């Protein structure tokens, strides 16, 4: 009686069929939000129930799954989702970007270039890019139908009028295949250029809001901007303190209450890979490594 | 009279076969023009190809009204098999169908007669599953669009011969439109509404 009472990858087959049909339509209409009958999952909304449902619908026994949360493989959210699928689907899991065939992500795109054999699944909180400008779903539907995106440009312009530059730093709106304006999920705008012409299929799942959308491989994804205020990706002007990378997206970590801070790669796999390859930053050689060698330093 | 017990079987392993078939169809849809293989076998009553049968078992259910061409609709074994294994309601009016199964290209109705979706919900459209002679040899078609790195070349023997001309309606209709899935035995190629033919050989 201890046999698991759930199906492979948790979801029942009827639910998977429904999600699979939505995924196919999402791929056929790049950037368009397909409504789907989102299920309750054994985790709260906001923990990636949309991404989990998409992953459950595509995952097979041959897949190798990687889950990241803000670039990190070892945060609670990433670990629990990885364990969820290791338990319910028995799939192999990895933290190495290159080894993964399915990567579920919360708010980052890995630094390593993705390949044609990979699928990137985003967890999305608010799929509608126009929602904070127009609360009514009937109206935003109509605006997408008419490709009426002037309001979004007004919002970006108001940023410029108020701050002198486009101050939107994450969930920066993009236009997909020259038609639909899409929310890339709250990824830093640093990641936006990686979505353009990406060899991997990108799927987006919003569980609470019950929407699935997609960017097929090799599809044009343009960040909205103005001729005199072109889109610019942002990163802290510092090298990673652990691996010295100058091209990765950095997290700012406050290290004491006197204003000290360090900048480290948000993509832990990328950072660890660089450190293993012999790259060093200003704060590498942390104490725990000396201890691991038997305290020969002391 | 055929009883249920005499119908060809569905998937041996419902769950993993459906997953594997879906990934082939998803890859096909994501990379238009690329030929994907459907591995899991399922019994299929003639003239339904094994690829078509696997797609039906993977994507059809009571939520997906299904339209059959006259040749398929006339074969009671096909209708029974679909009903028994998928539960999809077979409809006479193709403008309300989620999926259309076409075994004979000559019987493909004008594409405008299918559901094209509405501007607010372009996903509410018919996916046309068309059985063709070959997806490996025949006339070359050069394709362009999302999912294709530059151009892709598809070599296929397709009926109706003017399928890609007919699919031109997608250009004016977008984001509404028809997504086509071509099946030849176990090979599958998808032509979503975003795909354009740039040139074709004769």
Image (cartoon, rainbow, N blue to C red):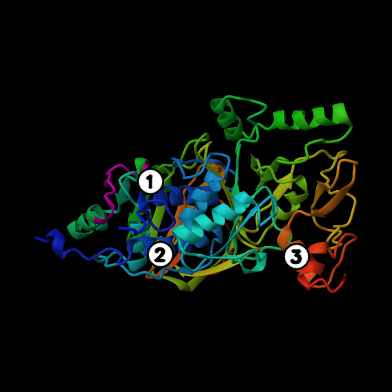
Left or right: B148 in relation to B131: right
Place residue A95 in its image quadrant: bottom right
* x, y percent for residue B153: 57, 68
Q: Quadrant of the C terminus of chain A?
A: bottom right
Determine which residue is flagged by label 2: B183
Magenta stretch, main secondary structure class: loop
Q: In this view, does A241 lie above or below B61?
A: below
Chain letter of the residue carrying label 3 = A
Range of magenta residues? B85-95
* x, y percent for residue A267: 73, 57
CA gap, disc 2 and disc 1: 17 Å
CA gap, disc 3 and disc 1: 48 Å
Question: How many numbered marks appear?
Answer: 3
Residue under the image location 85 percent in, 31 percent down = A160
Front residue of B74/A141: it is A141
Front residue of B23/B50: it is B23
* x, y percent for residue A42: 47, 45
Chain letter of the residue carrying label 1 = B
| Residue mark closest to the camera, 2 vs 3 | 3
Q: Quadrant of the N terminus of chain A?
A: bottom left
Left or right: A270 in relation to B132: right
Residue under the image location 32 percent in, 67 percent down = B49
Element under label 3?
helix
Determine which residue is flagged by label 3: A272
Decide: few, some or many residues near mark 3? Use Cα within 10 Å; few <14, some 14-19, many ≥20: some
Element under label 1?
loop
Residue under the image location 55 percent in, 48 percent down = A51
| Residue mark closest to the camera, 3 vs 1 | 3
């Amino acid at each position: 009686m201890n046999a698991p009472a759930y199906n492979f990858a948790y979801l029942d087959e009827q639910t998977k069929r429904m999600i699979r049909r939505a995924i196919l339509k999402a791929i056929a209409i790049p950037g368009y939000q397909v409504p789907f009958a989102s299920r309750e999952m054994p985790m709260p909304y906001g923990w990636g129930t949309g991404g989990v449902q998409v992953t459950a619908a595509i995952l097979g026994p041959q897949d190798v799954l990687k889950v990241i949360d803000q670039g990190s493989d070892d945060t609670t959210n990433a670990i629990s989702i990885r364990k969820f699928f290791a338990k319910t689907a028995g799939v192999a899991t990895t933290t190495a970007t290159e080894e993964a065939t399915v990567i579920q992500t919360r708010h980052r795109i890995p630094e390593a270039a993705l390949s044609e054999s990979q699928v990137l699944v985003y967890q999305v909180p608010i799929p509608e890019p126009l929602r904070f400008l127009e609360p009514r779903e009937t109206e935003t539907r109509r605006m997408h139908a008419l490709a009426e995106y002037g309001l979004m440009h007004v919002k970006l312009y108001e940023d410029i009028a108020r701050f002198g530059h486009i101050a939107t730093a994450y969930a920066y709106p993009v236009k997909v295949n020259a038609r639909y304006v899409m929310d890339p999920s709250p990824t830093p705008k640093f990641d936006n250029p990686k979505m353009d012409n990406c060899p991997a299929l990108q799927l987006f799942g919003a569980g609470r809001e019950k929407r699935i959308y997609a960017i097929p491989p090799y599809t044009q994804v343009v960040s909205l901007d103005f001729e005199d205020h072109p889109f610019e990706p942002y990163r802290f002007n510092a090298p990673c303190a652990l691996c010295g990378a100058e091209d990765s997206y950095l997290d700012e970590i406050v290290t004491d209450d006197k204003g000290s801070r360090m900048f480290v790669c948000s993509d832990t796999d990328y950072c660890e890979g660089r450190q293993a390859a012999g790259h060093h930053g200003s704060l590498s050689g942390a104490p725990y490594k000396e201890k691991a060698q038997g305290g020969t330093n002391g | 009279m055929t009883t249920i017990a005499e119908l060809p079987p569905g998937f041996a392993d419902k769950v993993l076969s459906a997953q594997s078939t879906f990934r082939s169809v998803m890859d096909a849809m994501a990379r238009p023009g690329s030929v994907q293989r459907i591995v899991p076998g399922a019994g299929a009553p003639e003239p339904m190809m094994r690829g078509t049968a696997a797609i039906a078992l993977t994507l059809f259910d009571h939520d997906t009204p299904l339209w059959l061409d006259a040749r398929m609709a006339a074969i009671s074994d096909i209708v029974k098999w679909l009903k028994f294994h998928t539960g999809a309601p077979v409809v006479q009016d193709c403008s309300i169908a989620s999926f259309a199964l076409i075994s004979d290209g000559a019987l493909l109705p004008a594409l405008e007669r299918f559901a094209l979706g509405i501007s607010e919900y372009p996903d509410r459209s018919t996916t046309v599953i068309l059985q063709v002679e070959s997806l490996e040899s025949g006339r070359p078609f050069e394709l362009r669009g999302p999912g294709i790195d530059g151009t892709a070349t598809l070599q296929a023997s397709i009926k109706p011969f003017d399928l890609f001309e007919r699919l031109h309606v997608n250009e004016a209709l977008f984001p509404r439109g028809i997504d086509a899935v071509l099946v030849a035995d176990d090979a599958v190629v998808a032509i979503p509404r975003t795909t354009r033919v740039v040139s074709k050989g004769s």
